[in-house]
Amino acid sequence: MHKKLPFIVLLFLTFVVKAQDRPIKIIDEQKANRLFLYAVNENEKDLDVMITVTGTGFRQSKAKPRLTRIPATSKVNIKSLIIERGKTPQYEYELVVNDSLSRRALKRPFELIKIEAKRPILIYRTEKCTTCDTLIANLEKSIYLFKTEKLSDQPKMEAYLTKSLANSATPLESLSTPILNLGGKIFVDIETYEQLMDKLKEIE
């Protein structure tokens, strides 16, 4: 478990590109006498990021800051600070974010992360669902976070769907497709991962 230090962090975004839907996040993690800063890219495209850190209670490399490639949906260690003995680090940073990728950008090891889709994905599983397992397996391999629940564990939703589908060609008790809640909208006609991606783009 990492010890939480009372860091003072001030964020200045000096340049944010229009194509950047979600701001780059900077998170920190302490290991022994080092404080590692990670850039987290929750966008579905690569970005180049440069960080300049100032403050007290730590030492850092004197090398000039350089752009670092942060691949889509990834986390990259972008800076390492050495905590001075008996000091509490206080730091602030400037962040430059660029979607015009540079050939000279540093390429560092990265960790892929999961992100929320533009509309949160919730799958209600029914007893007769024949395509749920395949859809869920594909989502598990994707970049997206999602949740699944048994419809029988949600009596209010089950009652609502029973009533809504009572006069449809396929009533709830005969439904063999997943029931998807995408940001509050219910869909019963999505069977595949590809159809789900198309629907998410459609309702953005």
Image (cartoon, rainbow, N blue to C red):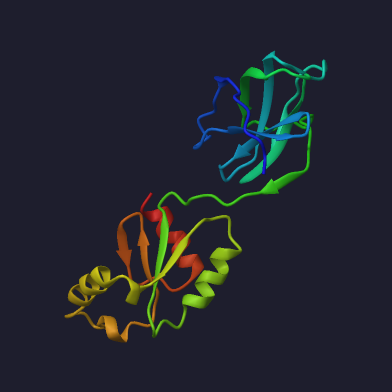
Q: Is residue 186 left or right of residue 136?
A: left
Q: Is residue 94 left or right of residue 172?
A: right
Q: Residue at x 70, y 47 (%)?
A: 111
Number of marks in the rendered image:
0
Q: Which picture quadrant has residue 200? A: bottom left
Q: Which picture quadrant has residue 176? A: bottom left
In this view, 92 is above or below 102? above
In this view, 53 is above or below 2? above
Regarding residue 71, the answer to whether it shows in the image is: no
Horizontal and vertical percent position of residue 6: 59, 24
Instruction: Return the residue nearer the eye: 177 or 153.
Output: 153
In this view, 6 is above or below 126? above
Horizontal and vertical percent position of residue 148: 44, 67
- Which quarter of the image is occupied by the N terminus? top right
Instruction: Return the residue nearer the eye: 152 or 169.
Output: 152
Regarding residue 175, the answer to whether it shows in the image is: yes
Instruction: Return the residue nearer the eye: 196 or 174.
Output: 174
Q: Is residue 60 left or right of residue 183?
A: right
Work out which residue is located at the far front of the displayed protein and give it: 86
Q: Residue at x 56, y 68 (%)?
A: 138
Q: Residue at x 18, y 80 (%)?
A: 166
Horizontal and vertical percent position of residue 197: 47, 60
Q: Residue at x 51, y 77 (%)?
A: 133
Horizontal and vertical percent position of residue 27: 62, 34
In this view, 87 is above or below 19? above
Q: Which picture quadrant has residue 87? A: top right
